Image (cartoon, rainbow, N blue to C red):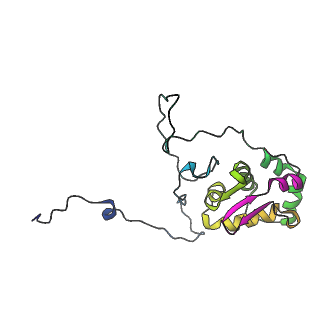
């Protein structure tokens, strides 16, 4: 009756998902995509993302009594930038630990970014996806990076930074960090 007329194509009929599987030693310009989740999902945590940023339209006039919705930009947190991580990296205990541990794949900049993110995170916890975005590594490499940060920061085995196996979150003990490294919490 319709003589083969289809009526258009649905995205499921024309879009083909593509996965690129490559060893880490392969030279390429590709970056892993961040897991798709909205910015407001876990609160106001600054995340360094390797994905290109998309310019969002700025509303020209906002009513004073406007009800916020899921699609408006989330306001920035009122707290200032954390100096806890900078104080940590400058501490004598950190320098001694860095010499004791020896060679690690984790850099001081990565430690600083992770501690800053954990300090600002609600309950001082980050999901593996947020930690991956903060460290700039794929999600499957987060346990290895966290183990190296823990090896560096956990003085005599006391867990300053740890991983919760039940929830796959990275956890900071701010009181222990302040006690062992003599830093103030921002």
- Along the line of sight, which residue is nearer the eye, 47 or 42? 42
Left or right for 121, reference 185: left
Residue at 19 percent of width and 62 percent of height: 6
Numbered disc total: 0
Residue 160 location in percent, x, y? 81, 60
Magenta stretch containing residue 170, yes or no?
yes
Residue at 81 percent of width and 63 percent of height: 159
Residue at 85 percent of width and 64 percent of height: 158
Left or right for 35, reference 150: left
Magenta stretch containing residue 96, yes or no?
no
* Rendered image quadrant of residue 126: bottom right
Residue 60 location in percent, x, y? 47, 29
Residue 96 location in percent, x, y? 89, 59
Residue at 80 percent of width and 66 percent of height: 151
Quadrant holding the C terminus? top right
Residue 54 location in percent, x, y? 49, 45
Quadrant holding the N terminus? bottom left
- Along the line of sight, which residue is nearer the eye, 76 or 23? 76
* Rendered image quadrant of residue 93: bottom right
* Rendered image quadrant of residue 152: bottom right
- Along the line of sight, which residue is nearer the eye, 139 or 171? 171
For the record, the magenta segment spans 159-185
């Amino acid at each position: 009756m319709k003589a083969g007329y289809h009526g258009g194509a649905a995205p499921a009929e024309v879009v083909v998902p593509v996965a690129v599987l490559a060893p880490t030693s392969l030279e390429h310009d590709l970056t892993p995509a961040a897991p798709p989740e909205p910015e407001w999902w876990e609160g106001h945590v600054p995340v360094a993302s390797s994905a290109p940023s998309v310019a969002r339209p700025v509303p020209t006039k906002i009513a004073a009594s406007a009800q916020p919705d899921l699609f408006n930009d989330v306001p920035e947190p009122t707290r200032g930038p954390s100096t806890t991580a900078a104080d940590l990296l400058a501490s004598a205990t950190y320098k001694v630990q860095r010499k004791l541990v020896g060679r690690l794949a984790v850099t001081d900049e990565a430690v600083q970014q992770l501690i800053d993110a954990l300090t600002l995170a609600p309950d001082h916890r980050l999901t593996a996806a947020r930690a991956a975005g903060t460290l700039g590594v794929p999600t499957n490499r987060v346990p290895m990076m966290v183990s190296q940060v823990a090896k560096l920061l956990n003085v005599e085995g006391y867990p300053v930074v740890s991983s919760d196996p039940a929830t796959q979150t990275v956890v900071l003990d701010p009181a222990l960090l302040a006690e062992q490294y003599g830093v103030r919490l921002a």
